[in-house]
Amino acid sequence: MISFLSLYYPLPRSLFSQYTLPLSLACTGEESWVDSRTVYIGHKEPPPGTEAYIPQRFPDNRIVSSKYTFWNFIPKNLFEQFRRIANFYFLIIFLVQLIIDTPTSPMTSGLPLFFVITVTAIKQGYEDWISHKADNAINQCPVHAIQHGKVIRKQSQKLRVGDIVQVKENETFPCDLILLSSSREDGTCFVTTASLDGESSHKTYYAVQDTNAFNTAEEFDTLHSTIECEQPQPDLYKYVGRINIYLDRDEPIARPLGSENLLLRGATLKNTEFIYAVAIYTGMESKMALNYQSKSQKRSAVEKSMNAYLIVYLCILISKALINTVLKYVWQADTNRDEPWYNQKTENERQRHVLIRAFTDFLAYMVLFNYIIPVSMYVTVEMQKFLGSYFIQWDDDMFDEEIGERPLVNTSDLNEELGQVEYVFTDKTGTLTENNMELKECCVDGHVYVPHAICNGQVLPGAVGMDMDMIDSSPGVDGKEREELFFRALCLCHTVQVKEEETVDGIKRGIHQGKCTSSYISSSPDEVALVEGMQRLGFTYLRLKDSHMEILNREDEMERFELLEVLNFDSVRRRMSVIVRSSTGEHYMFCKGADSSIFPRVVSGKVEQVRARVEHNAVEGLRTLCVAYKKLSHVEYEDVCRLLNCAKLALQDRDKKLAEAYDVIEKDFILLGATAVEDRLQDKAADTIESLHKAGMKVWVLTGDKMETAAATCYASKLFHRSTQILELTTKRTEEQSLHDVLFDLSRTVLRQHGSMTRDTFSGFSGDFQDYGLIIDGATLSAILKPTQEGTRNGGNYKEIFLEICRNCSAVLCCRMAPLQKAQIVKMIKASKEHPITLAIGDGANDVSMILEAHVGIGIMGKEGRQAARNSDYAITKFKHLKKMLLVHGHYYYVRIAELVQYFFYKNVCFIFPQFLYQFFCGFSQQPLYDTAYLTLYNISFTSLPILLYSLMEQHINMDILKRDPSLYRDIAKNSHLRWPTFIYWTFLGLFDAMVFFFGAFFLFDNATFTSNGQLMATNTQMMFGNWTFGTLVFTVLVFTVTLKLALDTHYWTWINHFVIWGSLLFYVIFSLLWGGIIWPFLNYQRMYYVFMQMLSSGPAWLSIILLIIVSLLPDVLKKVLCRALWPTTTEKIQNADKLYKGHLSEFTPLSSLHAPPARKHEESQNSAHRRSDSSLPKKLMCTYWGGRRDYCTFSSFLQIGENPRFSGAAYAYSAPGPETSV
Amino acid sequence: MKKEESSERPDNTAFTQQRLPAWQPILSAGIVIPGFLIIGLAFIGIGIALFLTSQTIQVLERDYTGYEQDSPCFSCTSSSTKNCTCEITFSLDKPFTGPVFFYYGLTNYFQSFRKYGVSKDDNQLSGDTTYFKSPQDQCFPYQYDSNKKPIVPCGALPNSMFNDTFELFHVVNKTKKRVPLDGKGISWWTDYNIKYRNPSPVNGSLANAFEGTVKPINWPKPAYELDPTDPNNNGFMNQDFLVWMRRAALPQFRKLYRRITEGDYAAGLPAGDYSVTIHYNYPVLNFDGRKKVVFSNVSWMGGKNEFLGIAYLVVGSLCLVMSVVMLVVYAKFKFKEDS
């Protein structure tokens, strides 16, 4: 399905979309040095004597993403298809029909099966053909390789390991390459991996220093060199190797190779004229290809109940066949019944053993009744899901103007699961917040600085150096120096690149306001925000040139620092460092990182002041970073260099050694200060969370951020209300008390509340009772999840108690989470005893694990690349779209598919049960009631389209109402439309209808009414109707009844519904007229000839058809009307109300008043007023907030700023001031 | 770049946005109560009409199986007697309005047996003489006779054709007056005219076309001699044969034997005594079957069937009752709403 959908995207993406990145963080420690490969660059032997030349065989550079070849398509595809249990079942039935003498011709099950198999095969074949085409395009695209000192063109698939390749700007790398030389003097090149992981930022890769001088094909012809490296492994960001260069006849020079030298297949060269590189992993061994992994299939709850129903029906089928077989032999005990003189058996039949006969009869009954399990249901469900997913993709409301993206459906199998979500796990950064960072303030030794704020596009003057905490605003000379050092530190300690063009995707900002000639790009938006902030504070980072970083200081003087080492950021250390040499020759090491990772490594500086400020900022919901530095003496620097090089050159466990080296180097810092970056809440995040709450979902925020920041965001996004009582389960608390006690304390608290809640169930979320919010951190969580030694006593208990607490909390915040822990939490909730349906939403690579773990994974196409979006089941552009996704699309698809499933079983009971009853009147001889054509076409053409279109078009309630009234979502919670009572109701309705059809026709035939007096057709005077007329009468009533039953259930009649419902009935009539109207030359029986017409020429037949249809529909109509009047569901109330207001309900009335106590009406209108005022406020205004002083003791939301009367403007005047505005 | 953006943007049509104009009916009491009322009244109307019509239809049934010892045909039940004839009598108090239809009825006879039903050769029956030499296999064991000669028409269904014959006499002053029976047009028009075909006569004789075949085992006469009185009523085009070949759906059935439409009896059977002379051939007792003769006339709604009328009446009144119940419920519900 993935690649089928990806047809609509440009080619490269369609291929790469199948490649998923590994959970790079999740699989640490799995790295193993299995064995190495030696690559001879340019296929040249090394100088004799150095090493034995063992040519290794490597695969060619052909990429195969297709599944089938031309030759194996049919057998392989058939094999795959018949592995599906349903297809296999129908195949067995078909084979049974072929082997034994069965009542129906093999056509009746063979044809639908053939149809299903063919449709699927065509679909899969087409998908595969597309991937073949894509493969061919890639495999045959020309590349430039060096051979015998000349650049020649080659097909990409003919590249071999060891070939030297020339890649020009904007070309894609044909395989995994080691960068040998670059047209840029410093031996770097820029690469974007947009097609690999969606990150459009330019990443820098480095050429091997000793080969960078080789710049032409001729020169490369003289290069003798080998590369030793590990065998390919799928981790994109890990590579360990060593290059040996034989310059002269001396000992080779060995250089380490790391992932910074490795250019990955699929990435694109940017900003670099050309490069030379050597192929090391080709074809299916390239890292991209190794990352090809088919996602594990997620199955929806609906599918599970469907399978349960199937088993029930299989049991019904088998018991029907058994009952009939037994009855047959009981009935046949009398030989005159078994073999009346007019129907003699053959000698052969008489001699057959009774058990064999019974078994054959049993199989024959199975064949006769097998239609009760509809082969077409699977096709219909699949088509419904596939076509239905387009409505999600097409939805204009979820289209994002800013980035021009629409929602992406990676799997359509879960459409209905969107309507069943009970737990929402959301990431914070980039999901709840915009991940659009802006430096809000920095704090140097406790002095607070606010950079030029941009307000409505204009720079507010004079905010520099504004001091909030200190009364004397001018720090001393010493302070001045520290301040500048701090700014320089921020200008130098980063991995930001300067992009000197205008159009770059991703993060871009003009360095010089107005000129917009260059912009900053980085994989981390925080860094860009910091560098930009520094620019506003007067220090502009210009560029990295010849490993010198150039910055422009406040006096517009150029300062140059030589960049010596970069100790890159990683999420374990949570910090990064650089070592630079100033123009005066001093060595500095700057380090920035999370407070928790910096403070323990600081030896001096105003730690307390900075810590206080950091905590304050965290409470405000700002992202804080601490900056520290140390001066290195020359000797120290040498030591550092040695340590680092040693680690870098290691072939084994390089990462571990590097980490150890970093740990040794990064210590004894002097604290400079801290920064605070604001990450604004996403548009309508709070509204969305509130809606989800009202819809009965529990929202959990899982973040790696620190508790205070995360908690502030939670308040801002209305996850926690001011009335929410916060329960803390953090390391801080468990240090004071044992985990055991804390857990029991908390559970007592919530259980007390639980008691009061049962008294007060009707008030729901609007009631006055205390609602609880839980905050838990990663360390405590792992303590809870960890199986303890005395496991029998406590181990499982903790988890249970914790789950019990969570169950009673309306919101949970998990902070300081490692990516894997996010997945663990999802897993834990999934496995809890109610087995709730979970949804995980996130935007970054660290959310991938939880997205994959949850029942429904939603990725946000955000700033942190596309990894999450690609691994998700659905990808959206903004968090707010989740509301429509769940409340509207999820709700619709659940209701639609529930009806689809129930209806399918119902119509097949109606279909087959009369056939079962007929066995009692044909001596249990397996005589089919219906003609072959009817048996075959019932499910695939007479009754298939109306339900398919119903399940695509039905809207039982208007979209706008669904969106406005999230509590409607509760009506479908817990798979409510597919519970056993509903299923049994449908089944019994089917049985009732079947009885009506059969016995209605039976009584009429019994008394031989069915004779026409010939008034309609003059030549016919008086005829008797035979068994086929009987069957046709039943069948006609059947087709009309089941179609009209669907019509009764349809609430949304577009012209399409009219067309398919009436069209199907018309088609049935026309088909029957045609089928009976002609002597079909290819049939060896003409039993249906004129049967339908003769039936229609009889008045009583018409009368009884009408009567039977009405009688069959009567109980359902009655049930509907009575239930609607006596025990209406919320949905039905809303429908009634909507009817009353002629469809304008959504515009005029507050919906909540229809089904909630009047108190809520007030709240509702208030909320909408808030929303209005929120949206009317330009976000930029928020900067002025800093002009004033405010206390920060309470958790306060960003939205309060908007609610501040000063800014609310006219829009606010309409709404009554609510309790939340009185801050 | 611009272009790509616009192509990514979904089409903003009513269809893609799921906002097609639609009629949104709701099965609320307001629609259903009047609906039920109308349906109920209409059904009761139809029901009364059907019921009354059904009452005017006269039916007369006589069992002649000979199961009981005192029944007139008892003597014919022993298998040893050949060409047995028996007679049953009945008298009509009031005239039987015409046209009167004369049926024979069988009970406990399963024409709906699956194998029995397919045991015939449609190709033979459509006059294809190539199948006269080698009938299709589904006719087995009525495919070839013991001399390996092909049976035409083959199969169990033709073989078991009902072969009792009846004569109806009006007893006027102790003299029997033969009531003319019309055997034409008692089968389906399409069966007679299109579906079943005799083989084209060889040398002007239908019998020659059957050369080399044998008659079905149970038949006294070959197919081309079924009706000696009317040469056009022979072979596969014999009306009685066609009636028999249309299988009954249920084990208790009637088939049309003759119509009484001619002569003095065109307007019906006048009151008086009648006797039916039965040429008793067809064995039914060994499978517990019964045979009977039925006289009936028809109306615009076919033969006598009180079920349809009663069903209409019952359903109609149910609808009325339901509409009243719903009205009560609805009124209560409304009342609750308003308060």
Image (cartoon, rainbow, N blue to C red):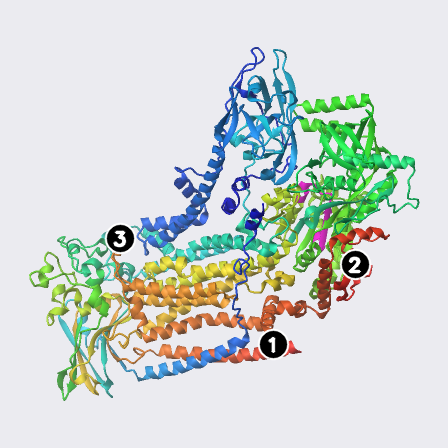
Q: Residues within 10 Å of mark 3 (few under 14, many from 20)?
A: few
Q: Which chain's residue wears label 1?
A: B
Q: CA distance from mark 2 to mark 3?
A: 95 Å
Residue sitting at the far front: A515
Horizontal side of residue A1215 vs A952, given as left or right = right
Can the viewer see residue B270?
yes
Vertical comparison of A601 with A1031: above or below: above
Residue bounds of the magenta highlight: A803-822
Contact (CB < 8 A) between labels 2 and 3? no
* A758 vs A321, nearest the viewer: A758
* A1133 vs A38, nearest the viewer: A38
* A239 vs A1009, nearest the viewer: A239
Secondary element at tag 3 = helix
In the image, what residue type sits under mark 1? Phe
Secondary element at tag 1 = helix
In the image, what residue type sits under mark 3? Glu
Q: Nearer the viewer, mark 2 or mark 3?
A: 2
Question: Is A817 in the magenta?
Answer: yes
